[in-house]
Structure formats: structure tokens, C-alpha cells
């Protein structure tokens, strides 16, 4: 059985670079690897397993020569490749918000709903980087005690916006420390030494689009459209890893010790919960790892059936590239390619 030929579309971006690294780390079996980016990068090279790979343009011909494409570029590219890829016989795993809520597109966190990969039509989506750790936590706890309502506030890193935003944070931080004026391009305001309660575009109901995504995607992944969810998404001056303060209301009371056991037993979740010794999940510890970390697990003092906790995970890895590659592994396991691989 031959292995898939793979493309990373947006290989030079914040997520694309990490995807390249994770494919190597996991020893993902493939017969060819193609890298694409914008015209600015075509002809430059990137390294995979010590070999130089030349960056190409994303063309129909290239997609026709691949069995699988990871797409993390921008919404326009996702819109285009989400259609063109499957037409060319290439399974697309997309990182944007363009396709996630399309009923024909599986939205997958393999630890939760791997079977949703079955019956895909050539296009699968990974959730928003703040959705995945929340959905995993809810799946772990809700299996034992059904969840009724969730309130989540996020503390999201700038790498979720892309590599330009990471560079901007560094530049602004240096400018502020030097007493110089800052310029803001990635966000409406300075992000260094600031927090912005604003991610995405404003909707009619007063929520920003990131908050709507978190709600709708979590409901879709869990197959629980009835869970009531309200989120506030906040950008913070952290380079990598998103954090979330979450309050969960269950049907019955949930003991914190039982919650710790359920979370620790769930694949991909690590409990870090020793607040007396100042041990809890933090972005600097989560960055560069694939796990979702949960701590500060306690009874919610505002509701008899409530639990409060704190989640942190690397938004570029489990929040994006790792999850995408895990979905590809599920496709490979099922032999669910669009064309025969013999
Ligand atoms: P480039 O580096 O050439 O601009 P980020 O999420 O970090 O902002 O990265 C976005 C990614 O999307 C980069 O790899 C960028 O390439 C890539 N990209 C932008 N436009 C295109 C395009 N037309 N085709 C393929 N990739 C693109």
C-alpha cells in the first residue's frame, strides 16, 4: 500500500511551519511532500528531514498530484482550495472558519468524534484553536454527567492571528520599553502591554465572530446543539498558547475529584492542579506541546451543579497543526482517500 502525497498550503505561515515540524516529529508516512505559499515565497526553500523543499504556487496541477492538503493560509485560499482540492482528487483538511459549520464537512477532534471522518466528501475542517481544548474538556466531563450550560472567557495568544501579529507584539514591546510610539496593524489597538476584548468581526447580537465560532463549533463537535454556551474571547500579549477560564453547569453536582479523574483519563488531557503550590497550567509551559492542560478545578460557588476550571493549550499545535495531522492519520487509517492508493 503506498502512502499519500501531501501538500501544506501556507507552509511559511505560523501554523504551516508547525505542521511541517509535526509531520516530521510524528513520522507521518508519505510518498511526497509539496509546500506552497504566496507568490512572495515561491522559489524559497524550507527544510524537511534535512532536505530542502522548494516552495511552489498552489495550482490545480499540484493538487491533482497530491492525495492530501493541509490548508492554513487565509479565508480566500480556504474557500478556493476547499472546492478545487476535492475536484482534483485531493483530500483537504482546512484550518479556517470558512467550512467548519457546513453540514457536509466533518469538524473533527479525533479524541472526541473521530468517526465523523467516515463519509467525508474530500473536505474536513479542524476547529478554531480556542474551541478544541474546550470541547475536549467538555467531552471528558460530559460523558459522565451531562452538561447544560457553559460560560468561557479566553486569553488568546497573538500567534492565533498569524506570524505578522507575533512580530508586531515583539516590535511594540520594544517600542514601549524604549518610550517610543507604537503602530498597530494586526489589531485595532496596540497589543503589547494591553488586552483586547475583540477577536473577529462584530455580529448583530453583540458577540464577535470568534465567540460565535467557539459556541457553534463546540456544539457541532459534541453533537450537542442544546448546550447553552456564552463566550468572551480576549486577545492577550502572549506569543503562543490560549488559556480559558470556564464555568460548567451539569445536570447533577460534579465533585472536583471526580472531574480530575475523568479529565486525567481522557486522551490528550493532562491535569495540572496543585494551586496550594502555585501549580496550574500556563501558556509558557503548554507552548511546544500537544496536550490540553486543565487545572484550578473547583466547585463553582454560584451554582450547586457548577464546576469552575482553567484550560491551556498550544494554539498552533493541538489548536491547529497537531489536530489536522491527527485527522489525516484517521483518514489514512480508514483508507478514506479520494483516489485509489495501491
Ligand atoms: P507567505 O509567507 O508567502 O505570505 P500566517 O497565518 O502566519 O499569517 O501565514 C499565512 C500563510 O498563508 C503564509 O504561509 C502565506 O504565505 C500563505 N499565503 C498567503 N497567500 C497565499 C496564496 N495565495 N497561496 C498560498 N499561500 C498563501
Image (tube, rainbow, N blue to C red):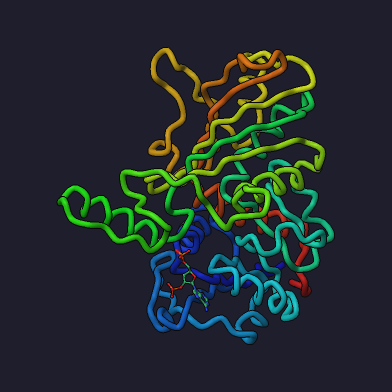
Looking at the picture, tell me which residue is in the foreground, 126 or 34: 126
Residue at 55%, 69% in the rendered image: 74
Residue at 59%, 69% in the rendered image: 75
List x then y, in percent, for residue 314. 49, 44
Quadrant of the image for the C terminus?
bottom right
Numbered circles on residues, count: 0
Looking at the picture, tell me which residue is in the foreground, 147 or 202: 202
Q: Is residue 156 left or right of residue 141?
A: left
List x then y, in percent, for residue 171. 26, 57
Q: Quadrant of residue 300?
A: top right
Q: Is residue 217 left or right of residue 164?
A: right
Q: Quadrant of residue 203?
A: bottom right
Q: Is residue 196 left or right of residue 225?
A: left
List x then y, in percent, for residue 114. 75, 48
Residue at 64%, 46% in the rendered image: 214
Residue lying furthest left in this view? 178
Quadrant of the image for the N terminus?
bottom right
List x then y, in percent, for residue 267. 64, 35
Residue at 52%, 52% in the rendered image: 199
Answer above or below: position of 148 versus 283.
Answer: above
Q: Is residue 304 left or right of residue 27?
A: right
Answer above or below: position of 189 versus 262.
Answer: below
Looking at the picture, tell me which residue is in the foreground, 277 or 234: 234
Amino acid at each position: 500500500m503506498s502512502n499519500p502525497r501531501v501538500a501544506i498550503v501556507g507552509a511559511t505561515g505560523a501554523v504551516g511551519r508547525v505542521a511541517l515540524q509535526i509531520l516530521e516529529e510524528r513520522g507521518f508516512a508519505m510518498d511526497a511532500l509539496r509546500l506552497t505559499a504566496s507568490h512572495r515565497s515561491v522559489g524559497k526553500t524550507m527544510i524537511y528531514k534535512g532536505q530542502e523543499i522548494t516552495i511552489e504556487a498552489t495550482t490545480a496541477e499540484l493538487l491533482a498530484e497530491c492525495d492530501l492538503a493541509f490548508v492554513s493560509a487565509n479565508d480566500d485560499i480556504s474557500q478556493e482550495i476547499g472546492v478545487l482540492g476535492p475536484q482534483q482528487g485531493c483530500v483537504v483538511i482546512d484550518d479556517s472558519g470558512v467550512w467548519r459549520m457546513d453540514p457536509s464537512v466533518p469538524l473533527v477532534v479525533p479524541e472526541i468524534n473521530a468517526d465523523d471522518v467516515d463519509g467525508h466528501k474530500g473536505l474536513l475542517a479542524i476547529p478554531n484553536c480556542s474551541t478544541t481544548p474546550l470541547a475536549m474538556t467538555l467531552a471528558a466531563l460530559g460523558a459522565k454527567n451531562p452538561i447544560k450550560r457553559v460560560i468561557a472567557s479566553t486569553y488568546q495568544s497573538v500567534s492565533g492571528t498569524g506570524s505578522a501579529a507575533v512580530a508586531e507584539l515583539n516590535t511594540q514591546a520594544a517600542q514601549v520599553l524604549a518610550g517610543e510610539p507604537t503602530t498597530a496593524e494586526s489589531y485595532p489597538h496596540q497589543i503589547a502591554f494591553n488586552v483586547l476584548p475583540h477577536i473577529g468581526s462584530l455580529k448583530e447580537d453583540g458577540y464577535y465572530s470568534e465567540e460565535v465560532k467557539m459556541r457553534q463549533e463546540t456544539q457541532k463537535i459534541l453533537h450537542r446543539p442544546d448546550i447553552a454556551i456564552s463566550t468572551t474571547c480576549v486577545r492577550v500579549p502572549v506569543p503562543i498558547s490560549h488559556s480559558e477560564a470556564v464555568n460548567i453547569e451539569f445536570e447533577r453536582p460534579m465533585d472536583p475529584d471526580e472531574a480530575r479523574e475523568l479529565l486525567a483519563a481522557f486522551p490528550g488531557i493532562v491535569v495540572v492542579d496543585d494551586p496550594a503550590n502555585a501549580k496550574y497550567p500556563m501558556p509558557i509551559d503548554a507552548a511546544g506541546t500537544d496536550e490540553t492542560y486543565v487545572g484550578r478545578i473547583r466547585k463553582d460557588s454560584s451554582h450547586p451543579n457548577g464546576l469552575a476550571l482553567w484550560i491551556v493549550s498550544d494554539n498552533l499545535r493541538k489548536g491547529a497543526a497537531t489536530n489536522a495531522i491527527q485527522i489525516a492519520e484517521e483518514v489514512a487509517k480508514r483508507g478514506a482517500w479520494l483516489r485509489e492508493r495501491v
